[in-house]
Amino acid sequence: MADTVKLTIDGHEVHAPAGMLVIDAAKLAGIEIPAFCYYEGLTLQAACRMCLVEVEKMPKLMTACTLPVAEGLVVRTETPQVAAARKYMLEFLLTNHPLDCPVCDKGGECELQDMAFRYGAGESRYNETKVHTPEKQYSPVVFFDAPRCILCYRCVRICNEGMGVNALGVVERGAVSEIAPNHGDHLECDECGACIDICPVGALTSGIYRYQTRPWEMTHVGTICTHCSDGCKTTLGTRNDRILRGNNRDRSGINGEFLCIKGRYGFDFYDHPDRLQAPLMRVNGKLEEVSWAQALAAVAEKFKQTIGAGTFGIVGSNHTTNEENYYLQKFARSVLGTNNIDHHRTGDVVTLVDALSGKSGALATVADLCERKAFLVLGADLALEHPLLSYQIRANYRHHQAHVYVVTPKAVREDKYAAATMRGRDYESLRDKLKAQPELVILFDDSYQGGELRKLVDFGESLGIPVRYVCLVDYANSRGAIDMGLTPELLPGYQPSGQSGLHLDEMLAAELSVLWVVGANPLENAARKSGFLVVQDLFLTETALQADIVLPAACAYEKNGTVTSGTGEVQRLKRAIETMGAKPDLEIIGFIAREMGAAAALGPWTPDAVFEEIRKNVRGYDVAMPALSTGGAAQTMPVNGRVAVPGPAGLVRSDRNGLFASGTLGRYSKVLNSVLESRLSR
Amino acid sequence: MTFSPQLEARFAKLLESYPAGRQRAAMIPMLLYAQDEIGSVTDELVEEVAQRVGVTPLQVNEVVSYYSMLHREARGKYHVQVCTNISCLLHDADQLLEHTCQKLGIENHGVTPDGQFSIEEVECMGACSWAPAIQVNYDYHHFVTPEKLDRLLDGLRKKQ
Ligand code: SF4
Ligand code: SF4
Ligand code: SF4
Ligand code: FES
Ligand code: FES
């Protein structure tokens, strides 16, 4: 092949695409060349000189991170000369280093430690007084310890290029240079923590994790962030049933190493002092703690009495798992005999799937956002509402110069590099420009629903190019709630339910005999009308406060199951910790069924069994198991059987959470409420 | 921020001298000229230049803090820069610096109370062949001895 060049690295013949850097070509041969400043996907820095290699016919050592491969190049990555050069570089990097590894958060997973160990740079000839500056706090999230910094610029580049925030810089010169925040003594940024995680040493540390543990004392569990619908994988570091940190350094999951503040630090709601750890029952007008047995018996009793004699309403959640949602609707329909089941819809997925029926491959994945050639962003401020999607499109622009068209009510971060920007909603005037693209992905929020959305799909389909869509929804399993039939008119897999039941607002307004709310807060600003109210939740929300029985639920990080991201990718939740007293909703629903003697009709309530049932029965969910079981994602292919669903106005509305809010759940996260920006953005 | 018409004209010319999209290249000369006019690089100037060349204020700050010719604090009307790098040092530049401080009655990095003089110890100015060298504002002075220095400073003092 013409664009492949042949070179030799440490005696191995390597065929690498032209233009590839030697440091990456070496990886093809399984050779790791040490690097601090080189970082895949970011601009080149060539600041650390750790990647020096010997190249035949070149007079001096070369930096493998900036040297492109060339035909016949002969590279040696570990000669005595190279080792000596690296050793001296390390000695140099350590001149002003405080050598405080025993108390440093990074100790044990520090790239500088690893290199010092590998090249034995254990001695220093530096006799001067070290330059030392005390550590600084730039925000509740970001701490900076200048003496540990090796000036690799990774943090600066990930913030500028990856996040598009430009919040960090390097000021001063030489031994006193240091990382500075954008607002004098503090940061005003996304508080994502990407700079902290990318730091090879312990110079940037997080207010959440610092001094909590040593890395090797933790267990690491890869699960899915429970906040927005982008579906980022977050690897939780836990110890003794406590979550100490979240990150995704192994780049598993659809998000690579991306996480926003919610996925990286916003797990902290789980041990909020207000967390419910025992069931509550209304006794003489007051909610009192009771045993699980008492509470479940009371619920079952009430449900049994009401079947056939009264009316039910069931409100499901945007956060509970597919299994829980499926089981809940099955319970409602087959045991309670009602289609009065709904949830807070945050995007008009139903109409999209309907408008696209008969077409395949029309739904974009997160990977598409990094690969497709053109994008049309409608309505949403992606960087704030869908941080991962925004990150992907930004990366796409950086690496492949994707054409991005922005039609939003307000200025957004995408404006900066957009091919065209427009305020308002007149996307149709972009027709000619869009038609000229080889392909397109359209992302739209809740301001495009019903007829407007059908118009949009017609527009997309009239362009004559392949178009894929992303219907933006708010929460971790907003999409799964719809797919699993938490709607009065549709069963799981968008099958008609026959006779539609009441919609969410109708249920709240009606005087139902029993209202059962699982993981939602529909009565946040309303008084209950139902005769009896059962609530499953983590906290005593406005809704739970009005309940007759409150059952303490486990959060996403305390259970197994699957969730479906806004892009329709199913991924597995893996239990990271257990919180005493709380139970997964699936188990709670199963126990209620058992108390009622209805368990046999519903089947087992283990996540695996229910997921098997989903795979068999829910159209689009017959996904391949290997990807899923190994922690990957599988895109579902929902099909709508052309069930026109004329939802009442106001049924679909996004909470527009932004970066520092997360519905009711966000109120219980200390970190989300502590950052300055969350106050500024309110 | 408003500048003199001459400076504005200079800025306009500067911004045109770089290819489209590379206007940030004008940052350093803009800062230098503006500093000469207003005496130092103020926060306001940082914001202004950032906005004019299309970068963040932090990026301007990175540059300002890197180059010693750009300074955030006001200096004397005559800024005396004494090189103490290797070639000059071999010609007793350390004593020259001490002498300068004594003569003006201020420390390194200080400014005389009347705002006329300031001193800064600097690294090599590229005048090694004529060491020891000093620089007063943009003017170089070579083979400097304490006596030559005294004459120079006395002359400048008279000129005020
Ligand atoms: S926390 Fe995120 S946005 Fe803030 S400085 Fe670090 S990388 Fe940039
Ligand atoms: S703080 Fe960390 S990531 Fe940033 S330059 Fe220093 S060592 Fe590199
Ligand atoms: S982008 Fe969404 S899914 Fe990803 S970490 Fe942030 S809140 Fe979680
Ligand atoms: S990795 Fe090549 S110079 Fe830093
Ligand atoms: S050492 Fe003083 S000018 Fe070069």
Image: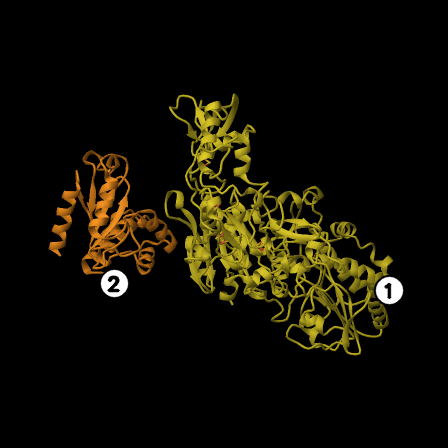
- The chain holding disc 1 is A
Is label 1 in a helix, a strand or a loop? helix
Q: Which mark is residue A95?
A: none
Q: Residues within 10 Å of mark 1 (few under 14, many from 20)?
A: some
Q: Position of residue B11 (x, y in %)?
A: 24, 54
Give the quarter of the figure containing the N terminus of chain B.
bottom left
> Given the image, on which type of amino acid does mark 2 rest?
Thr
From this viewpoint, is residue A397 visible?
no
| Cα gap from disc 1 to disc 2, whole angstroms | 80 Å
> Given the image, on which type of amino acid does mark 1 rest?
Met
Is label 2 in a helix, a strand or a loop? loop
Residue A425 or residue B89, whichever sits in front: B89
Q: Residue at x 13, y 57 (%)?
A: B160
Q: Which mark is residue B2?
A: 2
From this viewpoint, is residue B128 visible?
yes
Task: Indicate the quadrant of ligand 5 in the picture.
Answer: top left
Q: Position of residue A1 (x, y in %)?
A: 49, 27
| Chain B, hue in figure | orange
Q: Position of residue A292 (x, y in %)?
A: 82, 64
Give me the chain that's yellow. A
Q: Which mark is residue A596?
A: 1
Q: Nearer the viewer, mark 1 or mark 2?
A: 2
Left or right for A444, reference A568? left
Q: Residues within 10 Å of mark 2 (few under 14, many from 20)?
A: few
